[in-house]
Amino acid sequence: MPHKRRAKTHIKMQMSRQDIEQSLRDKGLQPTLQRVGICQFVLCMADHPTAEDVHAWAEQNLGKISLATIYNTLGSLVDVGLLRELKFSHSEKSIYDNNLDEHHHFFDVKTGLIHDIPVQNLELSMNLGKPFKVEGYEILLKGTVKP
Ligand SMILES: [Zn+2]
């Protein structure tokens, strides 16, 4: 998969409604009102939300919507590559990530928040032996973050 490299830290995508509609169309998805609304939240505002987080936001801002619709929408955004679905060991729930750059995560055990860690901030020395050919790695760090 080709990777566009962005500058050091992840800057939330600033997308207008028109930008969102266009990128949905580019990916072959119909820019329905609901879909565009959900995109505004998951692509521009949210920080590693669960489907339940997205659902809560959507119910408040878009009106009645089923959790199944949220899952379907998130699923299609993941399928077309606008969003990544992550699974971490601290929860059985998927987390949706709008940072498409290669990066690691830091899980704050106190607040439950997940922070992005740029790849260049972490150095790993590996001693795995011959059979392993490493093509990439994603690390979940755990700890606390000073306010
Ligand atoms: Zn992330």
Image (cartoon, rainbow, N blue to C red):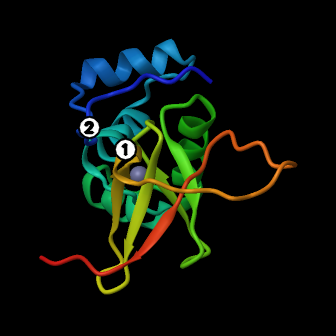
Side (left or right) of 115 relative to 1: left
Residue drawn at point x = 36 percent, y = 78 percent = 112
Does residue 65 show up? yes
Q: Are marks 1 and 2 in contact (CB under 8 Å)?
A: yes
Q: Position of residue 132 (x, y in %)?
A: 81, 49
- Residue 128 lies in what quarter of the image? bottom right
Residue drawn at point x = 51 percent, y = 52 percent = 70
- Mark 2 Cα shell of 10 Å, populated few (<14), some (14-19), many (≥20): few
Residue under label 2: 8
Above or below, 143 against 76 in this view is below
- Mark 1 Cα shell of 10 Å, populated few (<14), some (14-19), many (≥20): few
Q: Looking at this view, is 94 or 126 the one in front? A: 126
Residue drawn at point x = 37 percent, y = 44 percent = 120
Does residue 66 show up? no
Q: Position of residue 35 (x, y in %)?
A: 43, 36
Which amino acid type is marked by label 2? Lys
Side (left or right) of 10 relative to 67: left
Residue drawn at point x = 59 percent, y = 28 percent = 80
Residue under label 1: 120
Mark 1–mark 2 distance (CA, rounded to whole Å): 8 Å
